[in-house]
Image (spheres, rainbow, N blue to C red):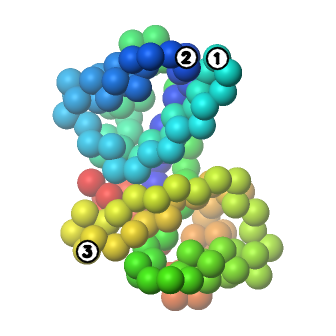
Amino acid sequence: MLKQISLYAENKKGTLEHITAILLEHDINILGSMTDDGAEYGVNRMVVSSPDVAMNALTQAGYLCSLKDVIGVEIEDKVGNLNSLLKTLLEMNINVYYLYLSFDRKSGLPIMVFSTDDIWEVEEGLRGKGYKVVEESAMS
């Protein structure tokens, strides 16, 4: 499984640059991210190379952060593969709360990162159906 940082930040000019500058100072690579904006605050979700270090640095800078387990599934880059993954999850009766894209740095293949309940059970079920579930060490 992967660790994702969810960071709540004010929706104003320069905030994302400040967040990435903090990560840069700590030599942390952003491997995948998604930002949901709101009127005043947004949620930034990121898979990074050193989640614990990033969490500590961003918290010390005054950001409200949390770490969450998410799933990363490597899929071949071809038409319909995301649909196939989602159809498999639906057949397993799994709800996907959100998803975003990352890439395997070695193979160049897309990795779909998503949040759901019962992470361990979902990972096991996907492996049983032939999907490659990505471990945190593979993302660095």
Q: How many C-alpha atoms fall within 10 Å of the one at disc 2: few (<14), some, or many (≥20)? A: some
**Horizontal side of residue 52 vs 108, given as left or right:** right
Of marks 3 and 1, which one's residue comes earlier in the chain? 1
Q: CA distance from mark 3 to mark 1?
A: 39 Å
Residue 89 in picture, x, y percent from top left:
69, 75
Of marks 2 and 1, which one's residue comes earlier in the chain? 2
Question: Where is mark 3, residue-wise?
Answer: 107
Q: Mark 2 near mark 1, Cβ–Cβ under 8 Å?
A: yes
Residue 130 in picture, x, y percent from top left:
52, 88
- Quarter of the image for residue 135 reads bottom left
Question: Where is mark 2, residue-wise?
Answer: 10
The kind of secondary structure element at disc 3 is loop
Question: Where is mark 1, residue-wise?
Answer: 40
Residue 55 in picture, x, y percent from top left:
42, 29
Q: How many C-alpha atoms fall within 10 Å of the one at disc 1: few (<14), some, or many (≥20)? A: few
Q: Nearer the viewer, mark 3 or mark 1?
A: 1
> Residue at point 56% right, 43% down?
68
Would you place residue 64 above or below residue 62 in this image? below
Q: CA distance from mark 3 to mark 2?
A: 36 Å
Q: Camera-side residue: 26 or 118?
A: 26
